[in-house]
Image: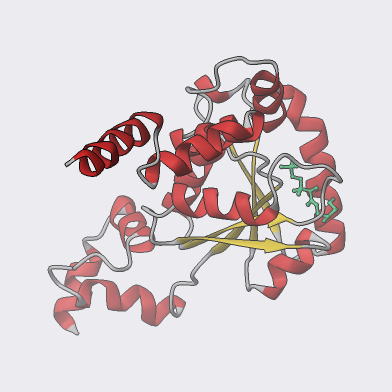
Amino acid sequence: MYLGLAVSAQLNDSDWLTARFSPRLPSPIPAAYNLPFLIRGPVKRIKAVYPGSFDPPTNGHLDLIERGSKIFDELVVAILRNLEKDPLFSVAERRNMLEAMTSGFDNVSVETFDGLTVEYAITVGASVVLRGIRAISDYEYELQMALMNRKLQPSLETVFMMPAEQYSYLSSRLVREVAQLGGNIDCLVPELVAQKVREKMDPALKFANVEQAEGKSPERKASKRKTRSRKKRS
Ligand code: PNS
């Protein structure tokens, strides 16, 4: 205990931050962190919900998820069901893509919800709603939504984060539009999403990919035909 007191007296502000955001870091002297716990009680884990339509998820979304995963203990990426009548991807497809994109983050999960974001956030025990702001043009809509959410549920805080500048022009709507008009979306979305978008635009690609995976590519078919005819002759 005396050792703990002596060491914690030497902790400066940045040590406090490290202790707060890395509670699982192996501590050389665990007692150093005991005193703050005794005074303030256990550190509260912060769970955030990142709601959106993600149709499709973009590199900008992924950038924000990565930033969110660094400052919150848990981050739930929450896909709104039935937002649009005619989405490009079904909710299940969006969920699959987001799960694949976030598989490297162990504190990020992907869920779906309907109804009010604030009600969903409270149901899952979140205290923060995370949203991205790319440019001033986003601000008005986001402010309106944040204030309405606060009116509905004062205990929830909205936290805005900015994605990297190179994504400041990027939106799901533009990705859909560029892809529909035959433009290249390769650097706008992760590769697995680009592939799925291409398949949506040209369903023949999907069958080509399935056939390729099953060894039914035109080349393979031709070589199989040759093998069969050789067998017949012999
Ligand atoms: O990615 P988007 O399309 O900008 O996400 C918008 C979303 C899903 C966050 C917003 O439409 C929403 O929260 N919808 C749920 C219904 C709701 O809570 N409406 C009141 C918001 S003030």
Let me know if residue 193 appears in the view: no
Q: Is residue 140 above or below residue 22?
A: above
The residue positioned 64% from the left and 35% from the top of the image is 200
The residue positioned 47% from the left and 44% from the top of the image is 210
Where residue 110 appears, x then y in whole percent? 56, 59
Q: Quadrant of residue 197?
A: top right
State the quadrant of the N terminus. bottom left
Where residue 216 appears, x then y in whole percent? 40, 40
State the quadrant of the C terminus. top left
Residue at the bottom extreme, as displayed: 1
Q: Nearer the viewer, residue 93 or 212?
A: 212
Let me know if residue 30 appears in the view: yes
Q: Is residue 213 above or below residue 49?
A: above
Residue at the front extreme, as displayed: 233
The residue positioned 74% from the left and 29% from the top of the image is 138
| Left or right: 174, with 190 as reference point | right
How many discs mark residues in the rendered view?
0
Q: Is residue 129 above or below residue 30?
A: above
| Left or right: 50, with 46 as reference point | right
The residue positioned 62% from the left and 49% from the top of the image is 94
Where residue 30 appears, x then y in whole percent? 20, 75
Where residue 73 appears, x then y in whole percent? 46, 63
